[in-house]
Image (spheres, rainbow, N blue to C red):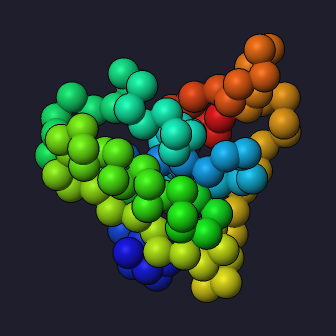
């Protein structure tokens, strides 16, 4: 999906928006979850409904493409990605938000997982 399409859909958001980029480099407003792309197969925090609408993004699109494949392998049928990632988002004139590093790294050094647009 293009940045323009995603921006329009964020106005009446009814999907799960996941930032899959590692390391954390900021996020789009209304991001629901920070979940590293390489942990898609290991996490129990994804929706139970396999037809849930999920949109993933990373910085450039390469990590989100891997995340989409992992989600499809897990049986999710309604998964899309932001083409070009955060780079395309900012190039289209939209802003990112970022959080202090301490808010998204657990004491053991691994990224924290978060929900509800509060960032990691």
| Residue most extreme to the top | 107
Q: In the rendered view, does 19 fall on the left or right side of 70? A: right
Q: Position of residue 55 (x, y in %)?
A: 38, 56
Seen in the picture, residue 77 relative to 11 is either above or below; the reply is above
Seen in the picture, residue 14 relative to 113 is either above or below; the reply is below
Q: Position of residue 18 (x, y in %)?
A: 47, 47
Q: In the image, what residue occupies the spot 64% across and 63% down?
A: 59
Quarter where residue 71 is shown: top left
Q: In the image, what residue occupies the spot 44% across and 54% down?
A: 66
Q: How many marks?
A: 0
| Residue most extreme to the bottom | 92
Q: Position of residue 58 (x, y in %)?
A: 58, 58
Q: Nearer the viewer, residue 65 or 19?
A: 65
Seen in the picture, residue 44 relative to 53 is either above or below; the reply is above
Q: In the image, what residue occupies the spot 66% across and 74% down?
A: 87
Residue 23 in view of the camera = yes
Q: In the image, what residue occupies the spot 42% across and 37% down?
A: 40
Q: In the rendered view, does 47 fall on the left or right side of 20? A: left
Q: In the rendered view, does 75 fall on the left or right side of 36? A: left
* Rendered-image quadrant of the N terminus: bottom left
Q: Nearer the viewer, residue 35 or 72?
A: 72
Q: Nearer the viewer, residue 70 or 115?
A: 70
* Rendered-image quadrant of the C terminus: top right
Q: Position of residue 53 (x, y in %)?
A: 25, 52
Residue 14 in view of the camera = no
Q: In the rendered view, does 104 fall on the left or right side of 50? A: right
């Amino acid at each position: 999906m293009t940045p323009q399409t995603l921006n329009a859909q964020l106005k009446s958001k009814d999907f799960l928006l996941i930032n899959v980029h590692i390391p954390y480099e900021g996020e789009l407003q209304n991001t629901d979850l920070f979940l590293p792309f390489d942990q898609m197969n290991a996490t129990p925090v994804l929706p139970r409904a396999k037809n849930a609408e999920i949109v993933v993004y990373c910085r450039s699109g390469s990590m989100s493409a891997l995340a989409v494949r992992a989600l499809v392998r897990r049986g999710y049928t309604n998964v899309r990605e932001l083409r070009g990632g955060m780079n395309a988002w900012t190039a289209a004139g939209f802003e990112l938000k970022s959080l202090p590093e301490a808010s998204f790294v657990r004491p053991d050094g691994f990224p924290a997982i978060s929900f509800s647009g509060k960032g990691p």
